[in-house]
Image (cartoon, grey):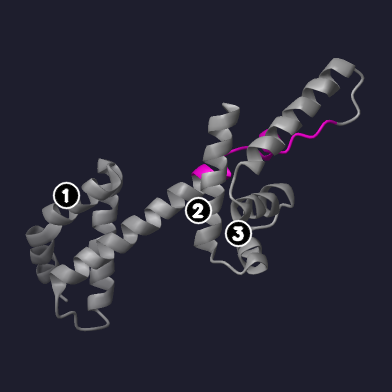
Amino acid sequence: MSVRDLGRLFLAHQREILSYLMVRLRDREMAADLTQDTFLRYAEQAGRAVILHERSYLYRTAHNLAIDHMRQVERRQTESVPHEALAEIPGQTANPEEAFAARQRVDQLRRVIAELPRRTQEVFALNRLEDLTYPEVARRLGISESSVQKHLSRALQHLMHRLEL
């Protein structure tokens, strides 16, 4: 594909791809970045294979890039809750009042976790309390990494809401 052909394609479809991504992402800068990535991927692929339906290819690529971006955002949000806030366990403390308060927090955490569906509790415990990675949790429970991420996202949202973190 020549530079001229790529420029023609860009001028013909850039606005609609950008608009599509802005609706999906609600972030103009990210939509602009992913629009550029869409055309870069097209240019890379066009050098290796014949693309019969250019517009369809561009939309499919933009769609896939948007999904990948949203997954990364969700993963970052899931991982941003500190382990210490969720797994605080009372230790040897000189002050009995602090030990009592810590035990109460742990009891409250256990009650809130018990409100979650069984599978979500399992995913949460394996990842946050046993420090297993997403792939390890997925293998142990026989579910996909995507399911692990969704269970953790739901669990953390529930915990943050109920514990007002």
Q: Quadrant of the C terminus?
A: top right
Mark in the foreground, 1 or 3:
3
Mark in the foreground, 3 or 2:
2
Position above or below: 94 against 6: above
> What residue is rendered at 63% in x and 53% in y?
118
Q: Earlier in the sequence, mark 1 or mark 3?
A: 1
Left or right of 89, for residue 58: left
Circles 2 and 1 in contact, beta carbons < 8 Å: no
Position above or below: 161 against 132: above
Residue 116: name its quadrant: top right
In-front residue for pair 46/155: 155
In-front residue for pair 2/60: 60
Residue 138: name its quadrant: bottom right
Characterize the local packing of mark 2: few (<14), some (14-19) or many (20 or more) Cα atoms within 10 angstroms: some
Let me know if residue 155 is in the magenta part: no
Name which residue type carries label 2: Lys
Name which residue type carries label 1: Ser
Q: Secondary structure at mark 1?
A: helix
Left or right of 65, for residue 155: right
Q: Secondary structure at mark 3?
A: helix
Q: CA distance from mark 2 to mark 1?
A: 28 Å
Q: Which residue is mark 1?
A: 19
Q: Which residue is mark 2?
A: 150
Q: Which residue is mark 3?
A: 134
Magenta stretch bounds? 77-90
Q: CA distance from mark 1 to mark 3?
A: 33 Å
Q: CA distance from mark 3 to mark 2?
A: 11 Å
Residue 10, given in percent of the width and then of the height, sits at 13, 61
